[in-house]
Structures are given as structure tokens and as C-alpha cells.
């Protein structure tokens, strides 16, 4: 099934800030860790893992989508999430630039 359409990504520097901000919450970081281990996970599966309500999980997933950290696929009435490997590569690049002192884009 095709991936759902995503909104256009912001400028690289703004995108990095949005992504790091999204990672600043322990549940969102945990969701991404779970997705790294188990891609294509239904949103409903996260409520049990993190012992929070489904509306809370939905809000966290919205933040991760808006930061372009996850991809989605609709399967019937469920939305399944996966970690976006390009997002991780982008964050790794930003952190690598910090180590080398490379100028920001």
C-alpha cells in the first residue's frame, strides 16, 4: 500500500530543530526506539507499551509526523508507523557536524 502523503519538509536547519524538539519527550523517543525494532507498527499498539491513553499516543505520533521522523501507511482503519531512515541520517549528519565544527546549513 502507498505511504500517505506528507506535508513538505521545512528548511534543513528548521527541520533539525523540529526533530530534536520532538525527541525531547521520553514517550516520543521510546516510540522511535520501538519503531527501530519493529517497523510498521499500528498506532494502537503503543498505548500498551507506554501505559498511556490512546489519545496521548495519537498526540505524540502527530508530533513525530510533523517533524518528519516517521512514515505512515494506512491499512483499512489502522495507521501503521515506521521510523524514517532518512530522518535518522539527517540527525546523524547534524550531530557529526557538531563534532567536526562544520558550519550549519
Image: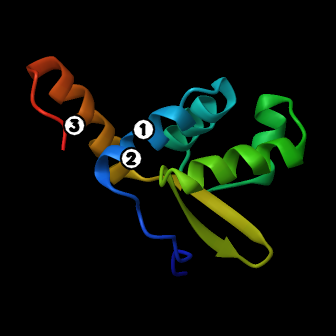
Q: Quickly name the residue at label 2.
A: 14
Determine the image quadrant of residue 26: top right
Mark 3, other Cα within 10 Å: few <14 / some 14–19 / many ≥20: few
Which corner quadrant holds the C terminus? top left
Q: Which of the 4 quarters of the picture holds residue 49?
A: top right
Q: Nearer the viewer, mark 3 or mark 1?
A: 1
Q: CA distance from mark 1 to mark 2?
A: 5 Å
For residue 42, what is the image quadrant?
A: bottom right
Label placed on residue 93: 3
Q: Vertically, is 18 above or below 98?
A: below
Kindly report the distance in space between the C-alpha atoms of the residues bearing marks 2 and 3.
Answer: 14 Å
Q: Earlier in the sequence, mark 3 or mark 1?
A: 1
Q: Are marks 1 and 2 in contact (CB under 8 Å)?
A: yes
Front in this rendered view, residue 13 or 95: 13
Task: Look at 39% across and 47% down and name the residue there.
Answer: 14
Residue with the mark numbered 1: 17
Query: What kind of element bears circle 1?
Result: helix
Residue at left offset 53%, top offset 77%: 5
Crowding at dot 2, Cα within 10 Å, few <14 / some 14-19 / many 20+, comes out as few
Relative to 93, 71 lies left or right: right
Q: Is residue 81 above or below residue 48?
A: below
Q: Determine whether 1 is above or below 48 in the image.
A: below
Judging from the image, what secondary structure is the residue with disc 3 in?
A: helix
Amino acid at each position: 500500500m502507498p505511504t500517505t502523503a506528507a506535508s513538505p519538509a521545512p528548511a534543513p536547519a528548521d527541520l533539525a530543530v523540529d526533530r530534536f524538539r520532538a525527541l525531547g519527550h521520553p514517550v516520543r523517543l521510546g516510540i522511535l526506539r520501538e519503531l527501530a525494532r519493529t517497523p510498521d507498527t499500528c498506532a494502537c499498539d503503543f498505548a500498551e507499551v507506554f501505559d498511556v491513553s490512546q489519545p496521548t499516543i495519537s498526540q505524540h505520533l502527530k508530533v513525530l509526523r510533523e517533524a518528519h521522523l516517521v512514515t505512515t501507511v494506512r491499512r483499512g482503519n489502522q495507521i501503521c508507523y515506521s521510523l524514517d531512515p532518512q530522518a535518522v541520517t539527517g540527525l546523524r549528519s547534524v550531530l557529526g557536524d557538531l563534532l567536526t565544527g562544520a558550519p550549519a546549513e
